[in-house]
Amino acid sequence: MQNLLSSYFQDLTTNADIKAILGALGGCLAVLFGGVYPLVNALVALWALDFVLGIKRAWDENKLSASKARRGVRKMFMYLVTVVVMGLVEYAMGAAGKLLSPCSLTVSFLCAHEGLSCLSHLSHFGVPIPKKLVDRLRNYRDEINDGTMPQGGEK
Protein backbone atom coordinates (compact mmCIF):
# COMPACT_ATOMS: atom_id res chain seq x y z
CA MET A 1 0.00 0.00 0.00
CA GLN A 2 2.78 2.40 0.93
CA ASN A 3 4.55 1.71 -2.37
CA LEU A 4 1.32 2.33 -4.27
CA LEU A 5 0.75 5.69 -2.56
CA SER A 6 4.35 6.78 -3.07
CA SER A 7 4.04 5.73 -6.73
CA TYR A 8 0.90 7.87 -7.18
CA PHE A 9 2.54 10.82 -5.43
CA GLN A 10 5.71 10.46 -7.49
CA ASP A 11 3.67 10.38 -10.71
CA LEU A 12 1.84 13.55 -9.68
CA THR A 13 5.02 15.41 -8.81
CA THR A 14 7.40 14.24 -11.53
CA ASN A 15 5.31 13.42 -14.60
CA ALA A 16 5.35 16.57 -16.74
CA ASP A 17 2.27 15.50 -18.71
CA ILE A 18 0.15 15.09 -15.59
CA LYS A 19 1.40 18.40 -14.15
CA ALA A 20 0.67 20.18 -17.43
CA ILE A 21 -2.86 18.74 -17.63
CA LEU A 22 -3.63 19.62 -14.00
CA GLY A 23 -2.16 23.12 -14.45
CA ALA A 24 -4.15 23.74 -17.63
CA LEU A 25 -7.33 22.48 -15.99
CA GLY A 26 -6.76 24.70 -12.96
CA GLY A 27 -6.04 27.71 -15.19
CA CYS A 28 -9.20 27.13 -17.26
CA LEU A 29 -11.30 26.84 -14.13
CA ALA A 30 -9.80 30.02 -12.67
CA VAL A 31 -10.53 31.93 -15.88
CA LEU A 32 -14.05 30.48 -16.08
CA PHE A 33 -14.95 31.37 -12.52
CA GLY A 34 -13.00 34.61 -12.32
CA GLY A 35 -10.55 33.28 -9.75
CA VAL A 36 -10.74 30.81 -6.93
CA TYR A 37 -13.12 31.35 -4.04
CA PRO A 38 -11.57 31.32 -0.57
CA LEU A 39 -14.14 28.62 0.24
CA VAL A 40 -12.66 26.39 -2.47
CA ASN A 41 -9.20 26.91 -0.96
CA ALA A 42 -10.60 25.84 2.41
CA LEU A 43 -12.25 22.80 0.82
CA VAL A 44 -9.02 21.68 -0.85
CA ALA A 45 -7.14 22.08 2.44
CA LEU A 46 -9.84 20.07 4.25
CA TRP A 47 -9.65 17.36 1.57
CA ALA A 48 -5.90 17.06 1.99
CA LEU A 49 -6.13 17.04 5.77
CA ASP A 50 -8.95 14.48 5.77
CA PHE A 51 -7.01 12.24 3.39
CA VAL A 52 -3.82 12.37 5.47
CA LEU A 53 -5.70 11.85 8.74
CA GLY A 54 -7.71 8.98 7.20
CA ILE A 55 -4.52 7.24 6.02
CA LYS A 56 -2.93 7.69 9.47
CA ARG A 57 -6.06 6.38 11.21
CA ALA A 58 -6.26 3.35 8.89
CA TRP A 59 -2.56 2.71 9.50
CA ASP A 60 -3.08 2.80 13.28
CA GLU A 61 -6.06 0.43 13.03
CA ASN A 62 -4.23 -1.90 10.60
CA LYS A 63 -6.99 -1.32 8.05
CA LEU A 64 -4.92 0.33 5.33
CA SER A 65 -6.46 -0.55 1.98
CA ALA A 66 -5.57 0.59 -1.53
CA SER A 67 -9.17 0.16 -2.66
CA LYS A 68 -10.45 2.39 0.16
CA ALA A 69 -7.82 5.01 -0.68
CA ARG A 70 -8.87 4.91 -4.35
CA ARG A 71 -12.53 5.26 -3.32
CA GLY A 72 -11.59 8.28 -1.21
CA VAL A 73 -9.71 9.90 -4.07
CA ARG A 74 -12.59 9.09 -6.44
CA LYS A 75 -15.03 10.69 -3.98
CA MET A 76 -12.89 13.82 -3.77
CA PHE A 77 -12.73 13.96 -7.57
CA MET A 78 -16.53 13.67 -7.78
CA TYR A 79 -16.82 16.48 -5.21
CA LEU A 80 -14.58 18.56 -7.47
CA VAL A 81 -16.84 17.77 -10.44
CA THR A 82 -19.82 18.83 -8.32
CA VAL A 83 -18.15 22.15 -7.49
CA VAL A 84 -17.37 22.72 -11.18
CA VAL A 85 -20.96 21.93 -12.20
CA MET A 86 -22.35 24.26 -9.55
CA GLY A 87 -19.88 26.94 -10.64
CA LEU A 88 -21.19 26.60 -14.19
CA VAL A 89 -24.79 26.82 -12.93
CA GLU A 90 -23.86 29.92 -10.94
CA TYR A 91 -22.17 31.46 -13.97
CA ALA A 92 -25.21 30.71 -16.17
CA MET A 93 -27.55 32.25 -13.58
CA GLY A 94 -25.42 35.35 -13.24
CA ALA A 95 -25.17 34.72 -9.51
CA ALA A 96 -21.38 34.84 -9.33
CA GLY A 97 -20.11 36.51 -6.17
CA LYS A 98 -23.46 36.54 -4.39
CA LEU A 99 -23.53 35.39 -0.77
CA LEU A 100 -25.96 32.51 -1.20
CA SER A 101 -25.00 31.45 -4.69
CA PRO A 102 -25.38 27.77 -5.69
CA CYS A 103 -21.63 27.19 -5.78
CA SER A 104 -21.02 28.86 -2.41
CA LEU A 105 -23.75 26.78 -0.77
CA THR A 106 -22.40 23.58 -2.30
CA VAL A 107 -18.82 24.32 -1.26
CA SER A 108 -20.01 25.31 2.24
CA PHE A 109 -21.84 22.00 2.57
CA LEU A 110 -18.78 20.07 1.42
CA CYS A 111 -16.54 22.04 3.83
CA ALA A 112 -18.86 21.22 6.74
CA HIS A 113 -18.92 17.56 5.70
CA GLU A 114 -15.12 17.34 5.39
CA GLY A 115 -14.69 19.31 8.62
CA LEU A 116 -16.81 16.74 10.46
CA SER A 117 -14.72 13.95 8.96
CA CYS A 118 -11.48 15.65 10.09
CA LEU A 119 -12.87 16.16 13.59
CA SER A 120 -13.84 12.47 13.72
CA HIS A 121 -10.29 11.48 12.80
CA LEU A 122 -8.83 13.91 15.33
CA SER A 123 -11.06 12.62 18.12
CA HIS A 124 -9.84 9.09 17.29
CA PHE A 125 -6.29 10.31 18.01
CA GLY A 126 -7.37 11.64 21.40
CA VAL A 127 -7.70 15.33 20.52
CA PRO A 128 -10.47 16.76 22.69
CA ILE A 129 -13.15 18.18 20.38
CA PRO A 130 -15.86 20.37 21.92
CA LYS A 131 -19.27 18.76 21.42
CA LYS A 132 -20.77 22.18 20.70
CA LEU A 133 -18.38 22.63 17.74
CA VAL A 134 -19.30 19.24 16.27
CA ASP A 135 -23.01 19.95 16.80
CA ARG A 136 -22.69 23.38 15.18
CA LEU A 137 -20.94 21.97 12.11
CA ARG A 138 -23.47 19.14 11.85
CA ASN A 139 -26.39 21.59 12.15
CA TYR A 140 -24.84 23.89 9.55
CA ARG A 141 -24.37 20.98 7.14
CA ASP A 142 -27.91 19.74 7.73
CA GLU A 143 -29.42 23.22 7.30
CA ILE A 144 -27.69 23.63 3.95
CA ASN A 145 -28.77 20.15 2.94
CA ASP A 146 -32.40 20.84 3.95
CA GLY A 147 -32.43 24.32 2.44
CA THR A 148 -33.38 25.91 5.78
CA MET A 149 -30.27 28.04 6.26
CA PRO A 150 -31.18 31.57 7.36
CA GLN A 151 -30.04 34.57 5.31
CA GLY A 152 -26.37 35.33 5.93
CA GLY A 153 -25.61 31.83 7.19
CA GLU A 154 -25.73 32.87 10.88
CA LYS A 155 -28.15 31.76 13.57
Image: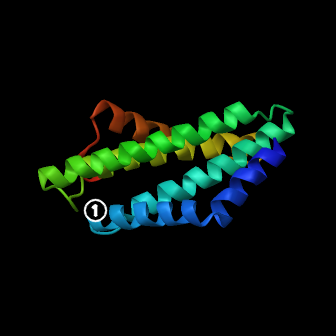
Residues 8 and 41: in front is 8
**Residue pictured at 24% horizontal, 57% vertical:** 99
| Image spot of residue 129 (x, y percent) | 66, 46
| Image spot of residue 41 (x, y percent) | 46, 62
**Residue pictured at 78% horizontal, 37% vertical:** 58
User: Relative to 10, does residue 119 appear above or below in the rendering?
Assistant: above
> Which amino acid type corresponds to the residue marked 1 in the rendered image?
Phe
**Residue pictured at 29% horizontal, 41% vertical:** 149
Residues 13 and 149: in front is 13
| Image spot of residue 27 (x, y percent) | 38, 67
> What is the residue that sits farthest to the front in this orientation?
17
| Image spot of residue 70 (x, y percent) | 64, 37
| Residue indicated by mark 1 | 33
User: Relative to 100, does residue 71 appear above or below in the rendering?
Assistant: above
**Residue pictured at 61% horizontal, 38% vertical:** 72
Residues 121 and 24: in front is 24
* SS assignment at label 1: helix
- Compared across the picture, whether 127 is left or right of 16 comes to right
